[in-house]
Amino acid sequence: MKKILCFFTALFSFVLMTNFVSCSDDSANESPAEKITVTYDLNYDGAPAATVIQQEKNKSFTLQAFERTDYRLIGWADTSDATEIKYQSGARLTLSEDHTFYALWADADSVVTLTLNSNTASATETKYYVPKNTTYAIPANTAKRDGSVFIGWATSATATTATYSDGEAITLTADKTLYAVWVSKDNANLVTITYHSNDGTNKSYVQYILLGGSSSLSSVYHKLTPNEFTRDGYIMEGWAKTADATEAAYDDGESVSNLLFITGSLSNPQLVKNVDFYAVWLDNTKLIITYTRNYSSSDTESFVKEISVTDNKATYTIEECPFEPETEGKVFACWQKDKYPGETIEFESETVRKITYKAVWISKTGSFSEKLTYYKDGSSGEKFEQYYNWSSQNELAIKDCPWTVEGAEFVGWAKYSSDKTPSYQPNERINTFDAPSSLYALWQ
């Protein structure tokens, strides 16, 4: 359960609650909004005709709910034959182009019901259906209450502090009702986070946080409201404190310390009433791969490779390590994330456009270090060595052959110099416990 954070003049310790309130337009005099078409296909035999809605482009909206006898709508997908939910029921989305959603249904007996009560003067209830024992992100509040702002959800209609926030993931094992929690707009302990689209459309939405309580100032965290913006040709990486930032300081939906809202020392903190976050966007057609030297946590030495992405797919080869060891006796083993130079990676993702690989360094003479020696022509010929740590590396990727022989073709690596057929091919993965101590280039 989330604690609630309160600001006192004499006692500065905090607990916190959070949530999304509204989506707004920073621009007072815009031209008429461009429209897109949103189509809801109920996606079952005998279903009524699809529902078609005209929706404002790049403006957030909530996916509609529909009824079906003996079934419950549990989510939406992008194709009629999908079996997995891509958009949960009640999700808020922002679209930049026409889109068709296909309904996914479950038998009524196999779901639980999440009921959200607006807890206003004329209270309304919205029901969402969730497969039992699954995790579900609480849909964003859309109600308003004069003179008040929404700070979260509670299990009681009379609660003054929130237990859950918009977008928070909860596991539902039984039916559950949550009530909106409201506080006065004039509350002195109210903090506002404004999220900016930062894409030229001047869209924004806000999240209100109520500070109060008696918990340790530095130990309280809260979840940032999940991103609702989209941008043609781009993927949202995260949030930054300035509009011109090229690197995200906070991940989407990250839990951040309440120190974000405080300046000064812990013994004399000062409240920051307004915080601005700006979306950081990545080109959807490029995958940025950063290889870092990783001598220490503060080591910034690195190099970058840019890979073309088409239809969320790309193919690339893991780069060789150009860095020299920091100290004598150390050697490069692999890239963190268990990747080896020369390996071909088949990349596919709708949400990722940045990957970081960190160099892993091991001692040549460590207790768990082993060496594999590669020979060009028998044990007396040219050779090179590959080191690995069998306690931390479950697998080893066989190296490529760096040599050529006139009139012959390299066909693989043999376990013994007398072998006529190869045992391994370059980049083949083998278990480190089964790794030989020597391999011999086989030429034909």
Image: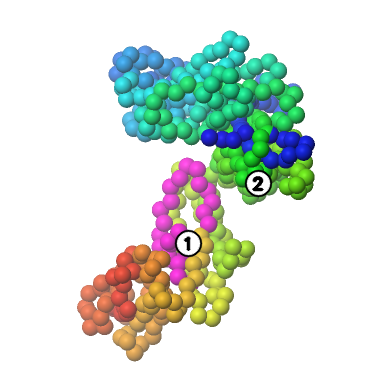
Res 46 label: none
Q: Which residue is drawn at 33% across and 14% down?
A: 69
Q: Vertical placement of 205 versus 363: above or below?
A: above
235 sits left or right of 431 in the view: right
Residue 164: image location, x then y, percent: 54, 30
- The front one of 193 and 291 is 193
Secondary structure at badge 2 equals: helix
- Which quarter of the figure is the C terminus placed in? bottom left
Q: Are marks 2 and 1 in contact (CB under 8 Å)?
A: no
285 sits left or right of 338 in the view: right
Res 218 label: 2
Q: Distance between the residues labelled 2 and 1?
A: 31 Å
Q: Earlier in the sequence, mark 2 or mark 1?
A: 2
Can the viewer see residue 98 in this picture? Answer: no
Q: Is residue 352 magenta?
A: yes
229 sits left or right of 29 in the view: left
Q: Residue at x 66, y 32 (%)?
A: 209
Q: Is residue 303 magenta?
A: no
Residue 384: image location, x then y, percent: 41, 80
Residue that protrudes farthest toward the top in the picture: 122
Q: What stretch is highlighted in magenta?
A: 332-356
Residue that protrudes farthest toward the bottom in the picture: 380
Callout 1, which amino acid? Gln
Q: Which label sits in the foreground, 2 or 1?
A: 2
Residue 26 figure quarter: top right
Residue 235 figure quarter: top right
**Residue corresponding to mark 1:** 336
Q: Residue at x 43, y 54 (%)?
A: 315
Callout 2, which amino acid? Ser
Secondary structure at badge 1 equals: loop
Q: Which residue is drawn at 38% across and 29% down?
A: 173
Circle 1: is it few (<14), some (14-19), or many (20+) Cα within 10 Å?
Answer: some
